[in-house]
Amino acid sequence: MLDRVRTTDLPNIAEDTEVLLKGWIHQIRDLGKIRFWLLRDSAGLAQIVLVSPKKHPSWEIINEIKQEYVVQVIGIVRHNEKAPDGVEVEFKSCEIIAKAVTPLPFSVVEQKTKANFDTRLKYRYLDLRSPKTRAIFKVRAFCVQGARDWFLKNNFIEIHSPKIISAGAEGGATLFPLYYFGKEAYLAQSPQFYKQVGIQAFERVFEIAPFFRAEKSRTRRHLSESWGIDVEVAFAESRDIMEIQEGLLISMYSSVKEHCKKELKLHDISDLKIPKAPFPKITFEEAVEIAKAKGYKVSLDEDLSAEAERAVRENFDTHFFIIEFPLTAVTFYYGPHETKPKFTHKLDLLAPGANGLELTSGGKRIIDPETLIRRAKETGIAPKGLGWYLDMFKVGGIPPHAGFGMGLDRVVMTILNLPTVQEAVMFPRTVDILKP
Amino acid sequence: MLDRVRTTDLPNIAEDTEVLLKGWIHQIRDLGKIRFWLLRDSAGLAQIVLVSPKKHPSWEIINEIKQEYVVQVIGIVRHNEKAPDGVEVEFKSCEIIAKAVTPLPFSVVEQKTKANFDTRLKYRYLDLRSPKTRAIFKVRAFCVQGARDWFLKNNFIEIHSPKIISAGAEGGATLFPLYYFGKEAYLAQSPQFYKQVGIQAFERVFEIAPFFRAEKSRTRRHLSESWGIDVEVAFAESRDIMEIQEGLLISMYSSVKEHCKKELKLHDISDLKIPKAPFPKITFEEAVEIAKAKGYKVSLDEDLSAEAERAVRENFDTHFFIIEFPLTAVTFYYGPHETKPKFTHKLDLLAPGANGLELTSGGKRIIDPETLIRRAKETGIAPKGLGWYLDMFKVGGIPPHAGFGMGLDRVVMTILNLPTVQEAVMFPRTVDILKP
């Protein structure tokens, strides 16, 4: 029996070779005396040519086949300048492997009108067969691979932190409560505390894993369940983790550019611009000035509103950092800046432009237990709720360290210029979406 | 200022070079006129020699330093056959970066008596500094890397499935319920349904992610939260996924053997035996015969007990498969075997010996909706609870496929011959353990 050949291998196969293809019937064009099938496999598309189909000994099967049927086709390779990719397969015989309903809930052929996002999600198993949807998740996979490549080249060690926890890293407001063998538990909103433990073994750690936030926000950038790329580094300052973020993001973009040429084109990105390091850095005070000058109400005491942040992003055409966030706008584990005590070493990395957004948050951590207790109280967290995390700094031997969390879904969204972050996730979870 | 040098780089640095080291004081040996510090960083250990420490201008700092203090030391490289790794550093000056309590809750020096597992977990930030504990998690990281390398070489695409779900893949008994914006939700016990969707885009998919099981079992092999390596492949039979499991496991072992030489030695493994493909295969019926012959009560209608399974494992000194599990002992999505209708294509991969255990479960899936409905009913699952999963097979165009889930924690446990799977997880979760 013939070995299966992938559609993308066809251009490299000699004229007249008999081949076996397996895949889905993507499209059927019937010109009467000649019929074309586009056969889709996970690699791409192949054109099958059926000459005089009605006179063909396999006519009964040929006539039965509809879009999205799974088939195997035996045919002869024909190199032909007019065919897609310069090659087509002359039909010889076929077998139906699995059937699909007719009509389909919606077409997965790109040129045709797409269903709305809710319908696409409802039939995600169908939607994922659309080359354009599929492209998103190939880009996502190579984003992750680009990140991993960079971590391994730079001597980081992967850790896995628990997703079921007894207390939150950033206070209780955005935690999902869970029933855990009669005990009170929550879903982890970040691996923050655990990656700070991980550096006691490895100094440079990363984790790529889901995290959970029970925010009721219905925006283009919020999810209840996201994947984060988390990093923590011992003996590091905020400037070190900015360099790491630059290297990491450049590696992610480069990986996508190298491995996803067709996929980028399907999303109308003809030449993905790889960010250039060093990225510009502005202080939070400077960001506030920019937003003020554009007429936004902003304060040095709280984080920028979504609108004010967009006003700042529009001043940039490259990724950039906002550094030195004010003490009043950050989580308790960020401490006062040595020379500017109303500010901190917390910083964000932002993607530029109107469709850009915050990609990372991070900075240098507090390691002095007294300062931690004071900052916890100032931000409304009871120090006794910090339990073992606070004990860690009391027992000590904790080196200075810094780290950040990057939103993978958001990086995919900005690379492909998707309208919402939900589009970057195969099975998104929001206030309103729990299925499939 | 000097750049920091890692302890493991010292053997390659020329005699008399001045170096800066940063790390933790692992051990102090005071011989009066000469004092030795073992300085530990994430790479390894370095011996610092202090000659006539009490006459040294830095005596006050030298005298203050205790175990697990974080320090930076400047010294001179001295190659010396008697020193560990043939090199030591002659002390010049030092600075205390962070202090630790004295006495420590327990020693992290390998030779000394270790605390029990509960105490080690309570102070995990301390325990992870012990080279032997650290070794476990480096081995774990390179297990994962070995798996990823294999997937990428074999054209698999990484997917991310949701961990918050509306219904379980294997019935409700082992689900953790969750409060999700007023709706009933659960933690995913497996990415089963979602990886079956993923193959509609990519044919060959994998996911490495946490999964959750609310089992009240207190055994050496159970966790409430585990990491799984999940695989699903379109157009595949059970024999194909056995080959994949062999390739994958060999790649994981090879990666550990290549990258974790020192770590394996710390766990008394001088020569890690890489499994050889093909692994032996026995049918469930044959496994039952083996257990029966050893005096165990076994039945063809239910899965092997832990004891009977061990009796079977003891017959093997290599990884092996048990294939063709009975219909009465498998989840609903496994269908009857074509020629042996009381059996299925479900199979397990087991690590051999008394400390071995089940590493994977998998097989060929049902794609016919009528069979799925019948099997769901037979296993006590209401078909309407299957919702979109059942719809997927009705809408159709679903190719035949097979897959498996591998327990990463269990692979690490068997590679290092750890007494329980809890030891293979940085922050384990069990019926009794929710912190840290």
Image (cartoon, coloured by chain):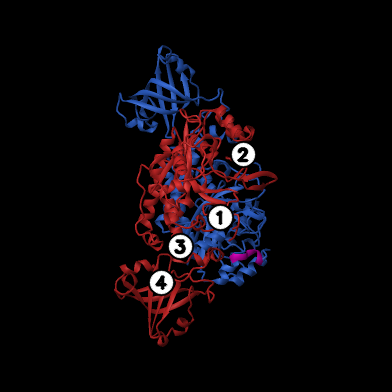
Chain colours: A red, B blue
Disc 3 marks a residue whose amino acid type is Arg
Q: Which residue does the numbered mark 1 point to in the structure image?
A: B162
Choose mark 2 or mark 1, whichever is in front.
Answer: 1
Q: On the rendered structure, is A434 left or right of A198?
A: right
Residue B434 screen position, x and y as percent = 63, 41
Q: Which residue does the numbered mark 4 point to in the structure image?
A: A21
Residue B25 vs A126, above or below: the answer is: above
Q: Which residue does the numbered mark 2 point to in the structure image?
A: B435
Q: CA distance from mark 1 to mark 3?
A: 17 Å
Disc 2 marks a residue whose amino acid type is Lys
Q: CA distance from mark 3 to mark 4?
A: 20 Å
Please report contact status of discs 4 and 2: CB closer than 8 Å, yes or no. no
The chain ID associated with circle 2 is B
Residue B290 vs A305, above or below: the answer is: below
Choose mark 4 or mark 2, whichever is in front.
Answer: 2
Please report contact status of discs 4 and 1: CB closer than 8 Å, yes or no. no
The chain ID associated with circle 4 is A
* Chief secondary structure of the magenta portion: helix
Q: Secondary structure at mark 1?
A: loop
Residue A192 screen position, x and y as percent = 53, 40
Disc 4 marks a residue whose amino acid type is Leu
Q: Secondary structure at mark 2?
A: loop
Disc 1 marks a residue whose amino acid type is Pro
- Image quadrant of residue B263? top left
Residue range (magenta):
B383-389
The chain ID associated with circle 1 is B
Foreground residue among A292 and B345: A292
The residue under the point 49% across, 74% down is A69
| In magenta segment, residue B384 | yes
Q: Which residue does the numbered mark 3 point to in the structure image?
A: A134
